[in-house]
Image (tube, rainbow, N blue to C red):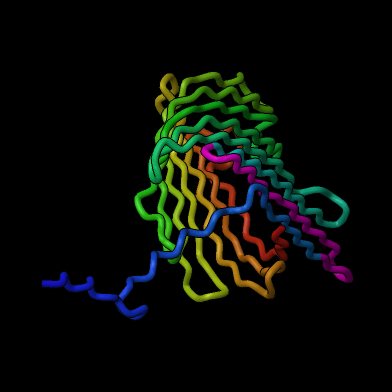
Amino acid sequence: MLAEDPPVLSPQAIPAPAPAPPVPPLFSGTAEFAFVATTGNSSTEAVGLSSDLAYRPHPWLLNAKGSFVQNRANNVVSAKSWTALVRLSRDYSPRLSGFTQYDYLRNLFAGIEQRHTTLGGISYKVIDASSQYLRLDGALGYANEQRLVGSALSTGTVVGGAAYKLKISPTSEISDEVRLVDSFTHVRDWRLDQTTALSAKINSIMSLKASYVVRYVQAPTPGFQSTDTISSITLAAKF
C-alpha cells in the first residue's frame, strides 16, 4: 500500500510573516525658528530658535536639545533665556532603559544667572505604539544654581517625569512633556517644567508647531515671580 503524499498548501493558506518594525535612522534632528516683529506706534521683536538632535547606535541613544528665546520692545530686551539638554540612554529591554542627563538654564529675567543639573535614572515605556507613546522617568541628581540675588543653591534632587505623544491624524500629533524636581535639602525648592505642543506637517520636511512652555519655581529668586510661560508658533524642519 503506497503512502499518501502530504497535502500541499496553497499560497493563500500560508500565513504571511509579520512585517518587521521600521528601523529608526542612525541620525536625525529638527530645527525650529520663530520671528515676530511690529513697527509704528510700538517697535517689538521676538525671536525663538531651537534644535533637537538624536544619534542611535543601538542599544544607545544620544539626544541633545537647545533653545534660545528673546523679546525686545522699543530697543530694550525684556526677556531672554537659554536652555540646553544632553541625554545618554541605553536600552535593556524593548521597554526599559537607563539614562544619564545634563541640563543647563540661563534666564536673567527670572533671576537665574545659570543652573546646572546632572542626574541619572531609569525610563519605562508604558505605551509604545504607532499612534500613541508614553514614557515615565525616575531619577536622582544634583543641581547648582547661581542667582542674581541671594546665595547660590546646591542640592541633591529627586526627579520624576513623563513624555506623551498622540497621533491625531496622518499629518498631525500632540505631545506633552512634564518634569517635577524636588530638593533634598531645601524643603520649599520644588519645580515643575511642562511643554505642550501641537504640530502639523506641511510636507515630508517642514511642519508648523504651536507650543506652550510653563516653568514654575516654588521658591523663586527674591524679587522675581514663580511662574514663567512661553507661547510660540514655529516653523520646523526635520532632517
| Nearer to me, 184 or 103 | 103
Q: Give the extent of the magenta segment.
A: 37-59
Residue 193 in magenta?
no
Q: Residue at x 79, y 62 (%)?
A: 35
| Nearer to me, 46 or 63 | 63
**Vertical comparison of 38 with 45: above or below:** below
Q: Position of residue 61 (x, y in %)?
A: 57, 40
| Residue 45 in the figure: left or right of residue 118 | right
| Residue 68 in the figure: left or right of residue 175 | right
| Nearer to me, 54 or 19 | 19
**Vertical comparison of 196 with 98: above or below:** below
| Quadrant that contains the C terminus | bottom right
Dominant SS type (magenta):
strand
Q: Residue at x 39, y 65 (%)?
A: 17
Q: Residue at x 43, y 33 (%)?
A: 159
Q: Residue at x 62, y 60 (%)?
A: 231
